[in-house]
Amino acid sequence: MSKYILPASVFGTVFGCAVLLKSKVTGGPCPSKATIKGKTVVITGANTGIGKETARELAKRGGRIIMGCRDMEKCEAAAKEIRGKTLNPHVYACHLDLASMKSIHQFAERVKQDEQRVDILINNAGVMRCPAWKTEDGFDMQFGVNHLGHFLLTNLLLDKLKDSAPSRVINLASLAHIVGKIDFDDLNWEKKKFDTKQAYCQSKLANVLFTRELAKRLEGTGVTVNAVHPGVVATELGRHTGLHQSQFSSSVLSPFFSLLVKGPELGSQPSVYLAVAEELEGVTGRYYDVMTEKEPAPQALDEEAARMLWEVSSRLVGLEEERGQTGKMNTPAEGQSKAAQANPAQTSPAPAVRGVVA
Ligand SMILES: NC(=O)c1ccc[n+]([C@@H]2O[C@H](COP(=O)([O-])OP(=O)(O)OC[C@H]3O[C@@H](n4cnc5c(N)ncnc54)[C@H](OP(=O)(O)O)[C@@H]3O)[C@@H](O)[C@H]2O)c1
């Protein structure tokens, strides 16, 4: 029996220290105490995880919060909870399904009509390692939601952001971008065997490339854009992975994992920091690992890839046709998925978009 005492106490001490040091090691709270009274924040995927805690913290700091979520029941419940906890009545639930271009257009129209300004846009929603699902428009789910959906939404809200300048866009990327590769020949996994892990990494690399290209195109407008890896955070993001699906891992491993990694409250601090910190005024096109600026992976610094991704994304979401409005036929965009081409009704262009940056 005694031979187990030493290893058990070493394990207990290491584990205890890891839990206690968790906050420090994982970045800690946002150092800025800035308040944002009078500012409007749009945040996607805000009904749970990092997004919900970001919404709560920014509501606490006095912002007007528009939560864009696909499940209105969860969204209303989260908005109500945040209003109750922060005593900020200006927290609103609004329908947004990033897997549907129609829904993104409707959400953006509503924001443009109802809101006088948009000071902060947080592209937070994400899906990780789901099966080979497609969006309503036929895009790979992870590329469609994580990149294309936010690409379209951001472009649709650009005029509001410019009119509200200085304003900020924050893109939730991930350290996973370092093993990402953009396959321009097959962005939607129609030719090669589907690899859900790679699909996530591709979409997160796209988030960083989008950030850099958008920053370039927004030079001089007063709108800044930065990408952030929030750290490893215990949220529902792993819902499609083995960790959440087996009984053993969800009841035994998962609680253990939650003790070691930070919770959504700490996980939201990097987004809050990028949204409010005074010292970040004018800082743009950067990548943050938690709250420290870092150089992203070499493939995320490839300017030609960033430009190409922008052009392909514009075509896929139909912004090119909208911008052109030359009277030419709206042919299915080059590279668009077969599913989308087969159903032109789903991809028909929405009204002209003033905010698109070419
Ligand atoms: N957690 C981490 O360790 C970690 C690490 C690196 C990066 N990130 C990034 O951080 C962001 C937030 O993730 P999280 O950890 O908070 O995950 P989460 O708890 O799973 O929350 C993701 C949110 O995105 C929403 N969402 C998913 N698909 C959507 C769609 N089609 N339309 C609108 N909303 C949709 C979800 O809504 P439902 O509840 O309705 O599904 C949920 O509100 C993601 O972009 C993720 O890639 C997280």
Image (cartoon, grey):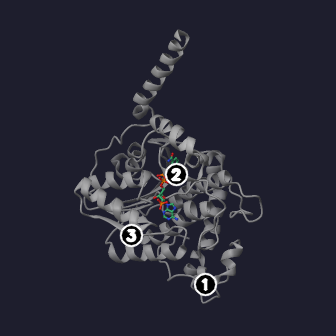
Q: Is mark 3 within 8 Å of ligand 1?
A: no
Placement of 163 over or under 192, stated as above or below = below
Q: Which of the marked residues, 2 or 3, is nearer the chain's N terminus?
A: 3
Placement of 243 over or under 103, stated as above or below = above
Percent of width and height locating residue 228: 49, 49
Numbered tag placed on residue 248 in the rendering: none
Residue 220 visible in the picture: yes
Residue bearing mark 1: 345
- Residue at horizontal 61 percent and vertical 61 percent from the top: 143
- Front of the two marks 2 and 3: 2
Q: Which of the marked residues, 1 or 2, is nearer the chain's N terminus?
A: 2
Say what amino acid the circle numbered 2 marks.
Leu
Say what amino acid the circle numbered 1 marks.
Ala
Left or right: where does residue 78 sit relative to residue 285?
left
- Residue at horizontal 50 percent and vertical 83 percent from the top: 351
**Which one is in front, 184 or 310?**
184
Residue 301 visible in the picture: no
Say what amino acid the circle numbered 3 marks.
Cys
Q: Is mark 2 within 8 Å of ligand 1?
A: yes
Numbered tag placed on residue 237 in the rendering: 2
Percent of width and height locating residue 166: 36, 60
Left or right: where does residue 130 sit relative to residue 274?
right
**Which one is in front, 253 or 147?**
253
Q: Residues within 10 Å of mark 1 (few under 14, many from 20)?
A: few
- Front of the two marks 1 and 2: 2
Residue bearing mark 3: 94
**Quick check: marks 2 and 3 in contact, CB under 8 Å?**
no
Q: Classify mark 1: helix, strand or loop.
A: helix
Q: Which of the marked residues, 1 or 3, is nearer the chain's N terminus?
A: 3
Give me the C-alpha separation between circle 2 and circle 3: 21 Å
